[in-house]
Image: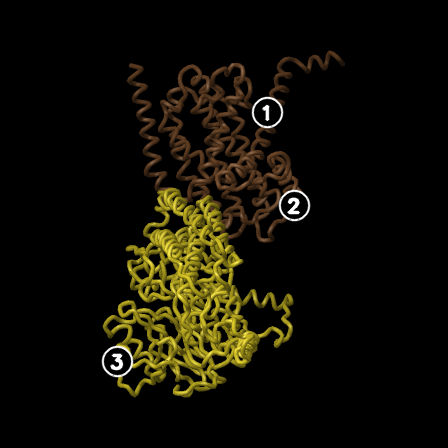
Chain colours: A brown, B yellow
Amino acid sequence: MFERIQELLSPVVLAAIWAACKAIIILLTLVVSAAWMIWLERRLLALWQDRYGPNRVGPFGLGQVIADMIKIFFKEDWMPPFVDKFTFVLAPFLAMMFMMLAFALIPITPNWGVFAPDLGMLLFFAIAGLAVYAVMLGGWSSNSKYSLLGGLRSTAQTISYEVFMGISLMGIVAQAGTFNLREIVLWQEQHIWFVIPQFFGFLVWCLAGIAVTHRTPFDLPEAESELAAGYHTEYSGMKFGMFFVGEYVGIVMVSGLTTALFFGGWDGPFSEHVPFLWFAIKCFIFMSGFILLRAALPRPRYDHMMSFAWKICLPLSLINLLATAGIMLWAGN
Amino acid sequence: MADGAPLTLPETVRDLFARFGENVFTLQTTADGMPTLWLPADRVAEVLRFLKNDIARPYKMLYDLTAIDERLRKHRAGQPPSDFTVVYQLLSIGRNTDIRLKVALLGEYPSLKTIVPIYANANWYEREVWDMFGIVFDGHPHLRRILLPPSWVGHPLRKEYNARATEFDPYQLDALRQDQEQEALRFQPEDWGMSRGTRDHDFMFLNLGPNHPSAHGAFRIVLQLDGEEVVDCVPDIGYHHRGAEKMGERQSWHTYIPYTDRIDYLGGVMNNLPYVMALEKLAGIKVPARVETIRVMLCEFFRITSHLLFYGTFAQDVGAMSPVFYMFVDRQKAYDVIEGITGFRMHPAWFRIGGLAHDLPIGWELKVREFLDWMPKRMDEYRRACLQNAILISRCRDVAAYDTAAALEWGVTGPGLRATGCDFDLRKARPYSGYDNFEFEVPVGAKGDVYERALMREEEIRQSLRIIEQCLNNMPSGPYKADHALTTPPPKERTLKDIETLITHFLGVSWGPVMPAGETSQMIEATKGLNSYYLTSDANTMSYRTRIRTPSFPHLQQIPSAIRGQMVPDLIAYIASIDFVMADVDR
């Protein structure tokens, strides 16, 4: 009996269990920080808008998130009679799932990270491409005109932004010589943060990253003042909650990815002792940036948005890739 | 009638007499001195065409179209016999004058030929007159109810229609009736001559409102969409109708003042101004200079608060989240001053016939000064943060643009008219309440698009600050009430010294003042455009007919003509730039 257990707990199995534990810890941290980000956003917006924001529940109103979660869990899970039931339920699951799945690719510290496949970046593109289905299906299955318009907008937006999102990162792939995100971070540790050699790639990536999360100024699918709430007009209760938290998970994910791709991941002074601290600080700065954008910018019209994508961002990312390749060839010779 | 006939005939009346002969018209004198002519129903189209197209400096704008139920009116000396009178009021920018044309109609449910082919904006006005009086306009393209639901029975502004809820059976809304009412509101494109699709694809009919974040109140607009392009649209109003005109017929002249506050509910006391000034003309009251200056100062405060709300919500409608919060903070600061002076914030109802409710409080200068020191630097910040934002400009430039001719055709006034390059601000063109004593500029645009309409209001806030500053520096001393028997409440000083004054005072306070018979009106440059009250007195304690001409009503009527072929986000920006409140539309 004892031997059998010992046999089962061979180093390989132990490593697998430990990896699973790590994955769960990362998942929980991600969800908690996404939920906590709702509080952060409300407080920061309030700060910038001369208001208080939630400050009653717990210290600094930190308990607000818990209170909101309890409320939304116990809310009646009402479904309008006219919706396409299966797709209607599926959409919010997809919204949250894809964003979490993409986070699995992000190398957090030298030892932490769920999954680092060799084609990690391509996998990320695939997931980001799928994520639009959540919004599209949500908009379509609601069987409401506002939702449909929101769904259409998000599709149009994705078609324009997917294209150059990939190209904007190809400069990194060319320089680091790998699609593996962990190796990209390691390359930056040895050489230089990609934000400097790939500055134009970074600019374009920022736009694409915001577009992936549907945040201001790319919040056209839900454009509150135009489409009431766009694709999630008909959602309530926890299903709405999943769209909502999914959005914040997306923000954390894109911030983490930006950190890993352009800002050296965990790299920083004393990073051998506190790698996670550096990762967290960098993420926090980008997350706050998302909120600042929301506080500061109006919403462009979606055809302006699309022509901007095709006429400016796409050529810019192509030129960036060509220039990177040219310089590498010249330096290689 | 006894209220001061003009000695010489106005130019327009001479032109009309020269063209059609004197016998066609009957001249009526009114307390407001506006040329008022009666003419036979069959000559209306001809005369209107002449005034609009053939005369020099023409009357391009149909300013108002309304009716009076004359059946119970006693004091009508010199006027042709009439059961229902339809009143047309035209405005000429070139002549800077108005003319009022009246048509006498006989019978219980009379009819008249429509004038929609001449003035496009007569469409809604004629629907309103039909809705309220039951007067039929022959040849009208869509003569259906506008302010009341389609299922309504009766025409409320007719004299036989009761005003009080207690005079009706209790209202009941059971499930069946609720379904019927809802079904009656269902939009049928065919009713409006719209097709449901082309050969290749269907249009989407999107019901925007009456409950929508950007509809600014209970306003519904049904869009015919091709993708996100607005092919056509039908605005639907009346969800905020509260019968303000009917209430004028059962409130005393004095107790009606608080109702006016709630017409343009962002305009506060500025709504009182045309009402009390019209009555002062009728009663022959000349108010002291101090009263005029205080009135101007408060009106400008309300212009600022109204424009600030516009500014913030406009930014919000084009997707900017923060400005509205800053502007509400500033609005509160303005309301603090207003509250300090009047004791109330949004609806002070502070002006009185012949004066004000009370004098300025001690220390008012400090509060006003504090606001004047605070506001200008905030305005500079807003311009940088909001109006100069590239995304905002790209959303607003060349969107829903119209020219001066279109603006006049649709009866557009206020910043919406000035943005087209037409320099017409009533405070300059026809100064009232002492506006000629102030130095200020009138911002004028050129393109008439959404962006310029916003720009006009932004600049008007600065000009209002200038006016308030001049009020502060040059506030005249003197009484806050005119010394006149019809001033309400009347001066009380001598009441305990002689019995006649006491009796007059007692009646004036208990019944309310009895206004001499006659007709009067006053037009002002309100926050949203030209607002006027046209009051008919039958020598009673109450008005015989109260007509409130509000600027927002024609502004909404114009929407389809300005937005066709543009997109849904443009429509949202356009609706924001109109700056309307539904109470100002539906009354």
In this figure, which residue is indicated by the disc labeled 3? B14
Q: Secondary structure at mark 2?
A: loop
Quote the CA–CA distance across marks 2 and 3.
74 Å
Q: Residue at position x 48%, y 34% from top?
A: A128
The numbered dot on residue A75 is 2
Q: Which badge, 1 or 2, is on the more N-terminal residue? A: 1
Marks 1/3 same chain: no
**Amino acid under disc 1:** Ala
**Amino acid under disc 3:** Arg
Residue A270 higher or lower than A253, as above or below: above
Q: Chain of mark 1?
A: A
The numbered dot on residue B520 is none
Q: Nearer the viewer, residue A103 or B299?
A: B299
Q: Nearer the viewer, residue A162 or B463?
A: B463
Quote the CA–CA distance across marks 1 and 2.
30 Å
Whether residue A301 is visible, yes or no, is no
Q: Secondary structure at mark 3?
A: helix
State which mark lies toward you, 2 or 3.
3
Q: Is residue B265 left or right of residue B180?
A: left
Q: Chain of mark 2?
A: A
How crowded pointer 3 is (Cα within 10 Å; few <14, some 14-19, many 20+) is rated as few
Q: Chain of mark 3?
A: B
Residue B210 higher or lower than A141, as above or below: below
Q: Is residue B226 left or right of residue B346?
A: left
The numbered dot on residue A23 is 1
